[in-house]
Amino acid sequence: MKVYTLGGYEEVGMNMTAVEVDGEVVIFDMGYNMENVISSEGQVDEMTTNQSLEIGAVPEDEPVLDKNVVGIVIGHGHLDHVGAIPKLAGSHDCPIYCTNYTAEIVERTIEDDRKNLSNQIIRLEKGEEMNVSGNFNLEFAHVNHSIPDSTLSLLDTPEGYVVYGNDMKIDQSPVIEETTDVERLKEVGEEGVKCMIPGTTRVDDQGRARSEESVKVEINDVLESCYDAGGAVFFSTFSSQIGRLNSLIEANDDRRKIAFVGRSLKEYVESAEKLGLINTDQIEVVSYYDECEELMDKVDGERENWLVVATGNQGEPGAQLDKMASGTYPFDFEKGDHMIFSSNVIPTPENKANRHKLENKLEDDGVRIYPGIHTTGHAHKEDHRDFIKFLQPEHIVPSHGTIQKLGSYVDLAREEGYSLGEDVHLSENGKCLNLDE
Ligand SMILES: [Zn+2]
C-alpha cells in the first residue's frame, strides 16, 4: 500500500491524501488552503486550476494525475476539505462519494465556481457499504465534529482497512446527531486496520475536547444575563455550526425575534433545513443588501426585541458584523448592546488583526463583548489516544497540521508503543509513503 500525502502535511488546511493498492487509487478530500484563499480576496472562484495552484490555494495533485483514480472520498463539508474539488476533481474520471449534507455543500461549491464537472456525486448513508472498485469497499462511520454529517471514512482494502479521520472528536453530549460510533470503530479495529490517517490540529491540547452540550449551558447563561440587562443582542459563530445555532434558538425560547444575516449563514442553514437539521420557520434569514438594510433599520428601532445572528466572527472586512459596526446600514450600536462570539479566533496574524479592529469599534460604541463561548470540533490528546485504542492501526500517518502538530502526534503514538519511521510516519506535502517496505 502506498499513501500519497498531497496536502495538509505542512499546514492546517488544504487537505488531500491518496491511497494506492494494486494499481488503484482512492483520493481522500480536496481542500482549500483558507489563508491563501482569503488573501486572494475571493478571486479564487475566477481562477483556473493552474492559477489557484500557483497561489497555493489548492494542493499540488501532480503525483496522482496519471494514476488510475477510482474514487474521491469526502469526509465532511468544511472548505479546507471540499474547496478544491472544482479545481481538481475534473482530472479524474470517477465518482465523488460523501454523505448527504456534505453533498449539498460539494454541489454548491462546484456551482459557485461555475465549473461543469462530469464526476457523479454519490450520496451514502452512514453505515451503508459501497463497492468502489475491485480493491475497495467504502463505508462512512458517524463521528462528531463541528458540521453536520461528519464521518470517518472506512476504506476496506485487500490489505486491511484505511481509516481516514480528518476531522473528528468524541462528544459524549452532542446537541444534534449521536456520539461518535465507537462500537463500529472497535469492530473495524478487530477486523484489522492497515493505516489510520488522523487530523492533528488540536493534539497539543491536553484532555478531551469539551462537549457541545456544555457550550449550550454557557449560551443559556450569557443570553439570560443579556436579556435581563436589555439592549440589542448579537451572536456570531461559524456558519456551518448548525448544532450551535439550534442551541441558541432553544435558549431564546421564543422570547425575541431572531434574524440570520449573511450569505454563508443562509446557504449552510438552507442545506441543513432540507435535511431536517434546523427549523427556520420563525426566523428572518437575509443576505441581499436591501434585505439586510431593511432588517437592520427595524432592529435599530426596536433593539430590545431582537437577537441578531451575523456572519463575520473573525472580523473579516466586508462580512456582516464589520458592515454593521462600520455604519453601512441604518443601524448604530449603542452603549449596553451585547456581542456574543461563539467561536475562537483562528490564530493567523490577519485574523487576529481583523478581530481586534472589530472589537475596538464595538467597544468604542460601548458594546459589551462575550468572547470564546465555544468548543472545538477537533480531538484533543486523550480523544486521539482513544481513537488509537479503538482502531489499533498497523500504521499511522498523522495529517492536517504543521510539522509541530504532526510531531506532537508522533509523541503521543510513541506513548502507545509506535516507533517513528516504522509504524508512525512523518510526511510532507507531495511525498509518497510505501507502507510495505
Ligand atoms: Zn472540519
Image: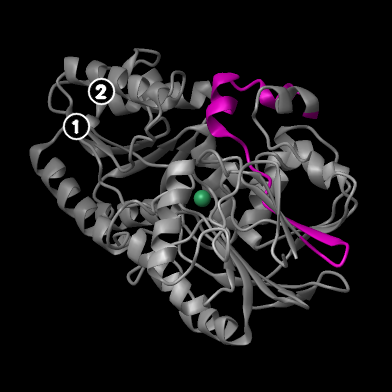
Tell me if residue 435 comes above or below residue 8 in the rendering: below
Q: Residue at x 34, y 25 (%)?
A: 352
Q: Is residue 37 magenta?
A: yes
Q: Residue at x 18, y 25 (%)?
A: 367
Tell me if residue 75 comes above or below residue 66 in the rendering: below
Point out which mark residue 359 bears.
Answer: 2
Q: Is residue 175 visible?
A: no
Q: Residue at x 64, y 30 (%)?
A: 57
**Is residue 50 found left or right of 181 in the rendered image?**
right
Quarter occupied by residue 338: top left
The secondary element bearing badge 1 is classed as strand
Q: Amino acid at mark 2?
A: Glu
**Is residue 179 found left or right of 120 in the rendered image?**
left
**Is residue 373 found left or right of 261 in the rendered image?**
left
Q: Is residue 272 visible?
A: yes
> Residue 391: percent from the left, percent from the top?
52, 76
> Residue 425: percent from the left, percent from the top?
57, 57
Q: Are marks 2 and 1 in contact (CB under 8 Å)?
A: yes
Q: Residue at x 16, y 32 (%)?
A: 231
Residue extent of the magenta highlight: 20-49
